[in-house]
Image: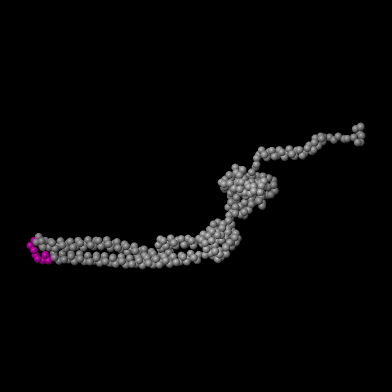
Amino acid sequence: MPSDHPNALVRRKGRPNTWRRIVNLWPLLVWIGAIAVAFWAYSQGVVFRRMNGAVDPYQENVSPLEEGYFSKLADGIVRGSHVEANQIVAYMSDTVLEEKISILTQEIDTRRTERIRNYNDDILKVESELRKIEGDLVAAQAETEATQREIDSMVNRMKALNLNTEAQRLALTGPIVSEFNIKIAKYNAIVGVRVKDKTQVENDRDRLVQERDILAKETDPAKYAERNQAAQLAQLVKRKARLTLHAARAGTIDRILKEPGEFVKQGEGVLKIVGSPTQIIGFLAQDQINQISQGQKVWITPTSDRTKIFDSKVLYLAPRMNSLPDSTGPTANSRLFGRDVLCEYPASSHLLPGQTVIIWIEPPGEIPLLNRWMSNKDAEAGK
């Protein structure tokens, strides 16, 4: 057939057969690409980049250490109100303990009155002894003076006799003077002893008066009670203090479990406080335990809004193994083994207790363009 025939085939320029062959082989190319990706993933192993977690909800069950009747809530304490650490939140009835404290205080006061009366009796006895000593001193002094006067009188009489020699006068007066001097020495010795006795008795009197006055002026029964009564009073006061319930940590009143007048056993909850979050807890599979370490920086994103990213760090890795139900396992009872991981709570995040989050061990901003569209500066910084 001639080339200019109207039905003759026209050959196009180029290599259409090559492209046609490539297009016809596209399923095979897809399979080759999938196999290549699978082989690359297998050669790289499992890449661990994140784990699920939640804000650790701290719940405090406020309960009394002494059983009794619930009296009332503290002023301003209602469900939903915020409380600070160590703030008073409720009161237990202290009627029974108050009665015991009152009875013991009366016994202590009665005993104090008896002790003051005993002090007064002892002081009277000491003062009586002191007066006797002072009388003995006066009598001894009088005897000494009288003896000295007799000696002086006798000497004067001897002088009036006009004896010839001094020897004659000494012969007459010597024995009598010697006897009188012995009496004077005896009286002086008595005076010295009684002076010491007087000083000791005066010290005893001053001590008794001081102790009595201190006891009479003291107003705190715990300070003037005797040892056994003071111990009993301290124990009762300590038990009474336990009836005032405090919040261990700051948080929010979640539930009020008792009404005023209800009997509450020791350890039974009166109200519950959900504490302010301080940490985030995650679960790390056992085969990934080497991928994370204590003090390592991580990133937290809430599952409800993954555009928000907060810096954090690993505070603690649980030393013991834990397990969770594995819904993706081959059987209904399959469990996933791993360890709990505690991370620092980002104070600026305002995440709620129990809120689910994602814990990233690598910066989650791996798509810079998408992050720029979302205007997430934290994600852009982590790319």
Q: Is residue 28 magenta?
A: no
Q: Position of residue 184 (x, y in %)?
A: 19, 62
**In this picture, is 164 found above or below 8?**
below
Q: Quadrant of the C terminus?
A: top right
Residue at far top of view: 2
Residue 19 found in image quarter: top right
Residue at 41%, 61% in the rendered image? 228
Residue 20 visible here: yes
Q: Position of residue 81 (x, y in %)?
A: 59, 61
Left or right relative to 269: residue 218: left
Residue at 56%, 60% in the rendered image? 269
Residue at 28%, 65% in the rendered image? 129
Q: Which portion, as a residue range, is magenta? A: 156-165
Foreground: 119 or 240? 240
Residue at 92%, 34% in the rendered image? 5
Q: Position of residue 178 (x, y in %)?
A: 15, 61
Foreground: 251 or 338? 338
Q: Position of residue 345 (x, y in %)?
A: 59, 51
**In this picture, is 24 found above or below 106?**
above
Type of colouring: one colour
